[in-house]
Amino acid sequence: MFTNEMIQSFNDLEMLLYNYITKNMDKVIYMRIRELSDATHVSTSSILRFCRKLNCEGFSEFKIKLKMLLDRNDQEDLKSTKYYLSEFLERTMKGNFEKYIQQTADMILQSDKVIFVGIGSSGILAEYGARYFSSLGTFSTYIKDPFYPINSKELKKSTAIVLSVSGETDHTLNLTNQLKMEGCNIISITNSKNCMLAKISDINIAYYITEVFIGESNITSQMPVMYILEESAHKIKKKQLENTKMNSDYSI
């Protein structure tokens, strides 16, 4: 209801109203405009201008939208994490899923550098992925700054593993395009193949799990991503050990 653009446009009086309303939403939905005016020491005309800025024709419509927001937050039904794990296993542990993980491992084995990319919560997983791969012998770095400068000419034999639930985040797409222009192979891990990030990737692994929101926050389970990262790292390590043994046997 209150977007960043709207909040940035508020003047001092409107910011005062915003702060009071967000702290007292359960009270404001039952207030008359005069009562809100008395509580905030803001004139009724200023309150009406505030409502119009929020695309409401008047105070009554504003209260209706505010109540709908409260009701939506109250009705959130969080299922057990077991539900999302079983959903992931049922939907993706079939067909070509394991094939894509093997293709991911094969591509990384042919790469000189591995770079994980993610923004927000995906950035945390990018950092985890880089550490996990490095722990298993595949040195990796990560980018979670949306404005990280990418202008290296040393990325020709590199692979970027890009993490994004929606696959439509502008900053993530911009970083991916820059890496692709520098010659990076792109592996994306998204919730669906029907997204822009999947379309511009060399390999896409989609895990298809129900997206969950609390208000404006996306709290979709990241367990599938953890599995994909760890399973890929294990396959790479297994192949490295096999190659080492093969070379050792050959030298004998």
Image: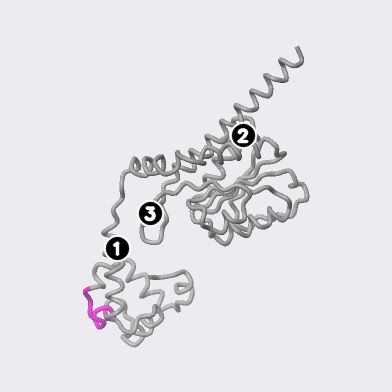
Question: In this rendering, is residue 206 above or below 132?
Answer: below
Sooner in the amino-acid sequence: mark 3 or mark 2: 2
Query: Which element carries disc 3, helix, strand or loop?
Result: loop
Sooner in the amino-acid sequence: mark 3 or mark 1: 1
Q: Is residue 252 left or right of residue 108?
A: right
* Kind of residue sitting beneath label 3: Val
Q: Position of residue 100 (x, y in %)?
A: 56, 41
* Neighbour tally class for label 2: few under 14, some 14-19, many 20 plus, Cα within 10 Å: some
- What residue is rendered at 64% in x and 36% in y? 106
Tag 2 near tag 1, CB within 8 Å: no
The residue indicated by pointer 1 is 72
The magenta span reads: 30-38
Tag 3 near tag 1, CB within 8 Å: no
Label 3 vs label 1, nearer the camera:
3
Q: Is residue 87 left or right of residue 97?
A: left
* Kind of residue sitting beneath label 2: Ser
Secondary structure of the magenta portion, mostly? Answer: helix
Give the CA separation, mark 3 to mark 2. Answer: 31 Å
Give the CA separation, mark 3 to mark 1. Answer: 13 Å
The residue indicated by pointer 3 is 212
| Residue 36 is covered by the magenta coloring | yes
Q: Which mark is residue 104?
A: none
**Residue 233, image quadrant:** top right
Q: Position of residue 45 (x, y in %)?
A: 34, 88
Query: Which element carries disc 1, helix, strand or loop?
Result: helix
The residue indicated by pointer 2 is 134
